[in-house]
Amino acid sequence: MRLRIINPNTTASMTDKIGAAALAVARPGTEIIAVNPASGPVSIESHFDEAIAAVGVCDEVRAGEATGTDAYVIACFGDPGLYAARELTRAPVIGIAEAAFHMASLIATRFSVVTTLGRTGIVAERLLHEYGMANRCRRVRAAEIPVLALERNPQAAFELIVEEALRARREDGIGAIVLGCGGMADLTEQIAQAVGLPVIEGVTAAVALAESLVTLKLQTSKHGDLDFPPAKPFSGDFARYSR
Ligand code: 5HY
Protein backbone atom coordinates (compact mmCIF):
# COMPACT_ATOMS: atom_id res chain seq x y z
CA MET A 1 0.00 0.00 0.00
CA ARG A 2 1.02 3.60 -0.57
CA LEU A 3 0.59 6.20 2.18
CA ARG A 4 0.94 9.92 1.51
CA ILE A 5 2.11 11.73 4.66
CA ILE A 6 1.37 15.44 4.33
CA ASN A 7 3.27 17.90 6.51
CA PRO A 8 1.00 20.95 6.09
CA ASN A 9 3.81 23.47 6.82
CA THR A 10 6.53 24.13 4.25
CA THR A 11 9.62 23.21 6.32
CA ALA A 12 11.29 20.42 4.33
CA SER A 13 13.55 19.28 7.20
CA MET A 14 10.43 18.68 9.31
CA THR A 15 8.82 16.76 6.42
CA ASP A 16 11.93 14.54 6.23
CA LYS A 17 11.78 13.88 9.97
CA ILE A 18 8.06 13.06 9.78
CA GLY A 19 8.69 10.74 6.80
CA ALA A 20 11.47 8.91 8.67
CA ALA A 21 9.25 8.38 11.72
CA ALA A 22 6.46 7.04 9.49
CA LEU A 23 8.82 4.68 7.64
CA ALA A 24 10.22 3.37 10.94
CA VAL A 25 6.82 1.99 11.99
CA ALA A 26 5.32 1.14 8.58
CA ARG A 27 4.78 -2.51 7.69
CA PRO A 28 7.05 -4.14 5.08
CA GLY A 29 5.51 -3.34 1.72
CA THR A 30 4.03 -0.03 2.84
CA GLU A 31 5.37 2.80 0.68
CA ILE A 32 5.69 6.13 2.49
CA ILE A 33 5.52 9.34 0.44
CA ALA A 34 6.27 12.32 2.70
CA VAL A 35 5.41 15.69 1.20
CA ASN A 36 4.69 19.31 2.08
CA PRO A 37 2.87 21.93 0.03
CA ALA A 38 4.98 24.32 -2.07
CA SER A 39 2.95 27.25 -0.76
CA GLY A 40 2.07 28.05 2.84
CA PRO A 41 3.48 28.89 6.31
CA VAL A 42 6.89 27.54 7.48
CA SER A 43 5.13 26.52 10.72
CA ILE A 44 1.51 26.44 11.90
CA GLU A 45 1.02 28.35 15.16
CA SER A 46 -2.25 30.23 14.63
CA HIS A 47 -5.77 29.94 13.17
CA PHE A 48 -4.62 31.97 10.17
CA ASP A 49 -1.64 29.64 9.54
CA GLU A 50 -4.06 26.71 9.74
CA ALA A 51 -6.52 28.25 7.28
CA ILE A 52 -3.79 28.74 4.68
CA ALA A 53 -2.23 25.32 5.38
CA ALA A 54 -5.60 23.64 4.81
CA VAL A 55 -5.48 24.71 1.13
CA GLY A 56 -2.01 23.17 0.82
CA VAL A 57 -3.33 19.94 2.34
CA CYS A 58 -6.10 19.82 -0.28
CA ASP A 59 -3.56 20.40 -3.08
CA GLU A 60 -1.44 17.49 -1.80
CA VAL A 61 -4.49 15.19 -1.68
CA ARG A 62 -5.35 16.19 -5.26
CA ALA A 63 -1.74 15.38 -6.24
CA GLY A 64 -2.00 12.05 -4.42
CA GLU A 65 -5.21 11.20 -6.26
CA ALA A 66 -3.41 11.83 -9.56
CA THR A 67 -0.55 9.43 -8.69
CA GLY A 68 -2.53 6.77 -6.79
CA THR A 69 -2.67 6.71 -2.98
CA ASP A 70 -4.25 4.21 -0.55
CA ALA A 71 -4.44 6.51 2.47
CA TYR A 72 -3.42 9.99 3.63
CA VAL A 73 -2.03 11.32 6.91
CA ILE A 74 -2.27 15.03 7.85
CA ALA A 75 0.86 15.48 9.97
CA CYS A 76 0.00 18.66 11.89
CA PHE A 77 -1.63 18.51 15.34
CA GLY A 78 -4.43 20.86 14.31
CA ASP A 79 -5.59 18.31 11.69
CA PRO A 80 -5.94 21.27 9.22
CA GLY A 81 -8.27 20.64 6.26
CA LEU A 82 -9.26 17.16 7.52
CA TYR A 83 -12.89 17.19 6.37
CA ALA A 84 -12.14 19.01 3.09
CA ALA A 85 -9.43 16.44 2.37
CA ARG A 86 -11.86 13.58 3.09
CA GLU A 87 -14.28 15.07 0.54
CA LEU A 88 -11.59 14.91 -2.18
CA THR A 89 -10.88 11.16 -1.96
CA ARG A 90 -12.32 7.73 -1.20
CA ALA A 91 -9.05 6.82 0.53
CA PRO A 92 -8.94 7.15 4.34
CA VAL A 93 -7.57 10.49 5.62
CA ILE A 94 -6.18 10.46 9.18
CA GLY A 95 -5.29 13.55 11.22
CA ILE A 96 -2.44 13.02 13.71
CA ALA A 97 -4.38 14.61 16.59
CA GLU A 98 -7.40 12.35 16.07
CA ALA A 99 -5.13 9.29 15.71
CA ALA A 100 -3.13 10.10 18.85
CA PHE A 101 -6.24 10.72 20.96
CA HIS A 102 -7.73 7.38 19.91
CA MET A 103 -4.53 5.41 20.47
CA ALA A 104 -3.99 7.05 23.88
CA SER A 105 -7.54 6.22 24.94
CA LEU A 106 -6.85 2.54 24.22
CA ILE A 107 -3.96 2.32 26.70
CA ALA A 108 -4.82 4.88 29.38
CA THR A 109 -8.05 6.05 31.04
CA ARG A 110 -6.76 9.60 31.10
CA PHE A 111 -3.98 11.34 29.17
CA SER A 112 -2.55 14.85 28.87
CA VAL A 113 -1.28 16.57 25.75
CA VAL A 114 2.03 18.46 25.60
CA THR A 115 2.07 20.83 22.64
CA THR A 116 4.37 23.65 21.50
CA LEU A 117 2.79 27.07 22.13
CA GLY A 118 0.03 27.87 24.61
CA ARG A 119 -1.89 29.70 21.93
CA THR A 120 -2.25 26.53 19.82
CA GLY A 121 -3.45 24.55 22.84
CA ILE A 122 -6.96 25.82 22.23
CA VAL A 123 -6.97 24.09 18.84
CA ALA A 124 -6.22 20.75 20.52
CA GLU A 125 -8.98 21.45 23.07
CA ARG A 126 -11.45 22.16 20.27
CA LEU A 127 -10.49 18.91 18.52
CA LEU A 128 -10.86 16.93 21.74
CA HIS A 129 -14.46 18.12 21.96
CA GLU A 130 -15.09 17.62 18.26
CA TYR A 131 -13.80 14.03 18.38
CA GLY A 132 -15.65 13.22 21.60
CA MET A 133 -12.42 12.79 23.54
CA ALA A 134 -12.59 15.76 25.92
CA ASN A 135 -13.49 13.58 28.94
CA ARG A 136 -10.38 11.42 28.36
CA CYS A 137 -7.89 14.31 28.36
CA ARG A 138 -6.98 15.92 31.67
CA ARG A 139 -4.99 18.90 30.35
CA VAL A 140 -3.55 20.38 27.18
CA ARG A 141 -0.19 21.73 28.29
CA ALA A 142 2.41 23.76 26.35
CA ALA A 143 6.21 23.61 26.47
CA GLU A 144 6.07 27.23 25.18
CA ILE A 145 8.44 26.57 22.30
CA PRO A 146 7.93 27.83 18.74
CA VAL A 147 7.39 24.93 16.32
CA LEU A 148 10.65 25.58 14.48
CA ALA A 149 12.63 25.40 17.75
CA LEU A 150 12.25 21.65 17.22
CA GLU A 151 14.40 22.09 14.10
CA ARG A 152 16.71 24.85 15.23
CA ASN A 153 17.45 23.86 18.85
CA PRO A 154 16.21 20.29 19.32
CA GLN A 155 18.03 19.63 22.62
CA ALA A 156 16.60 22.71 24.36
CA ALA A 157 13.16 21.91 22.93
CA PHE A 158 13.42 18.33 24.15
CA GLU A 159 14.28 19.46 27.69
CA LEU A 160 11.32 21.87 27.85
CA ILE A 161 8.92 19.18 26.57
CA VAL A 162 10.21 16.68 29.17
CA GLU A 163 9.84 19.29 31.96
CA GLU A 164 6.19 19.86 31.01
CA ALA A 165 5.51 16.12 30.62
CA LEU A 166 6.98 15.47 34.09
CA ARG A 167 4.70 18.19 35.50
CA ALA A 168 1.75 16.45 33.83
CA ARG A 169 2.81 13.12 35.36
CA ARG A 170 2.99 14.70 38.84
CA GLU A 171 -0.14 16.83 38.69
CA ASP A 172 -2.69 15.45 36.19
CA GLY A 173 -3.44 11.92 37.42
CA ILE A 174 -2.85 10.50 33.96
CA GLY A 175 -1.53 7.25 32.48
CA ALA A 176 -0.08 8.57 29.21
CA ILE A 177 1.25 11.62 27.37
CA VAL A 178 0.24 12.68 23.85
CA LEU A 179 2.81 14.74 21.92
CA GLY A 180 1.10 17.74 20.34
CA CYS A 181 3.18 18.47 17.22
CA GLY A 182 4.19 16.59 14.09
CA GLY A 183 7.67 18.01 14.58
CA MET A 184 8.05 15.90 17.74
CA ALA A 185 7.83 12.68 15.69
CA ASP A 186 11.46 11.73 16.40
CA LEU A 187 11.31 12.30 20.17
CA THR A 188 8.79 9.64 21.27
CA GLU A 189 11.13 7.03 22.79
CA GLN A 190 13.49 9.54 24.43
CA ILE A 191 10.56 11.34 26.08
CA ALA A 192 8.98 8.04 27.22
CA GLN A 193 12.26 7.03 28.86
CA ALA A 194 12.72 10.46 30.50
CA VAL A 195 9.13 10.63 31.79
CA GLY A 196 8.48 6.94 32.57
CA LEU A 197 5.01 6.98 31.00
CA PRO A 198 3.65 5.67 27.66
CA VAL A 199 4.03 8.44 25.07
CA ILE A 200 1.80 8.57 21.98
CA GLU A 201 2.98 10.42 18.92
CA GLY A 202 0.48 11.25 16.15
CA VAL A 203 2.41 10.50 12.94
CA THR A 204 3.21 6.91 13.95
CA ALA A 205 -0.27 6.41 15.44
CA ALA A 206 -1.83 7.65 12.17
CA VAL A 207 0.34 5.37 10.02
CA ALA A 208 -0.75 2.33 12.04
CA LEU A 209 -4.42 3.35 11.80
CA ALA A 210 -4.17 4.08 8.06
CA GLU A 211 -2.63 0.66 7.39
CA SER A 212 -5.42 -1.02 9.38
CA LEU A 213 -8.16 0.83 7.47
CA VAL A 214 -6.62 -0.09 4.11
CA THR A 215 -6.23 -3.73 5.19
CA LEU A 216 -9.90 -3.76 6.23
CA LYS A 217 -10.79 -2.18 2.85
CA LEU A 218 -12.52 0.65 4.73
CA GLN A 219 -12.76 3.87 2.71
CA THR A 220 -14.05 7.41 3.33
CA SER A 221 -17.83 7.33 3.02
CA LYS A 222 -19.21 9.16 0.01
CA HIS A 223 -22.70 9.08 1.50
CA GLY A 224 -23.49 12.47 3.04
CA ASP A 225 -21.16 15.32 4.04
CA LEU A 226 -17.93 13.66 2.85
CA ASP A 227 -19.17 13.10 -0.70
CA PHE A 228 -17.05 14.79 -3.41
CA PRO A 229 -17.52 18.59 -3.43
CA PRO A 230 -20.14 19.85 -5.93
CA ALA A 231 -18.61 20.94 -9.24
CA LYS A 232 -18.56 24.70 -9.75
CA PRO A 233 -16.38 27.47 -11.17
CA PHE A 234 -13.70 28.95 -8.88
CA SER A 235 -12.16 32.32 -9.71
CA GLY A 236 -8.82 34.12 -9.35
CA ASP A 237 -6.03 32.29 -7.54
CA PHE A 238 -8.37 29.30 -7.06
CA ALA A 239 -9.48 28.87 -10.69
CA ARG A 240 -7.55 25.56 -10.70
CA TYR A 241 -10.34 24.04 -8.55
CA SER A 242 -13.04 24.74 -11.15
CA ARG A 243 -14.89 21.58 -12.24
C1 5HY B 1 2.24 20.93 13.98
N1 5HY B 1 2.22 23.21 13.91
O1 5HY B 1 2.06 19.77 14.28
C2 5HY B 1 1.58 22.10 14.62
C3 5HY B 1 1.88 22.07 16.08
C4 5HY B 1 1.24 23.11 16.86
O2 5HY B 1 3.59 23.42 12.11
N2 5HY B 1 3.02 21.36 12.96
C5 5HY B 1 2.99 22.73 12.94
O3 5HY B 1 1.90 23.74 17.63
O4 5HY B 1 0.04 23.32 16.71
Image (tube, rainbow, N blue to C red):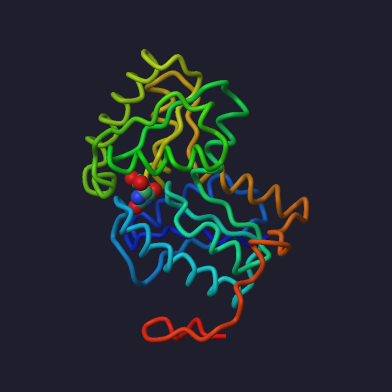
Image spot of residue 20 (x, y percent)? 46, 51
The one nearer the camera, 223 or 72, is 223
Residue 60 percent location from the top left of the image: 49, 69
Q: Quadrant of residue 70?
A: bottom right
Q: Which residue extends farthest right?
A: 216
Q: How many marks?
A: 0
On screen, residue 141 above or below 75: above
Task: From the viewer's side, name the closer residue of 149 and 106.
Answer: 106
Q: Does 149 appear above or below 34? A: above
- Which residue is at a point 30% across and 33% down the rendered structure image? 142
Q: Quadrant of residue 83?
A: bottom right
Foreground pick, 5 / 105 = 105
Which corner quadrant holds the N terminus?
bottom right
Side of 205 where 141 appears, left or right: left
Q: Give the side of residue 228 with respect to residue 117, left or right.
A: right
In the image, what residue occupies the spot 37% across and 22% down?
194
Examine the rendered structure and indicate whether residue 121 appears above or below residue 221.
Answer: above
Which residue does the image show at 57% across and 71% down from the upper left? 64
> Residue 102's spot in the image, x, y percent?
59, 36
For the C terminus, give its image quadrant: bottom right
Q: Residue at x 60, y 81 (%)?
A: 231
The image shows residue 99 at horizontal and vertical percentages of 56, 42
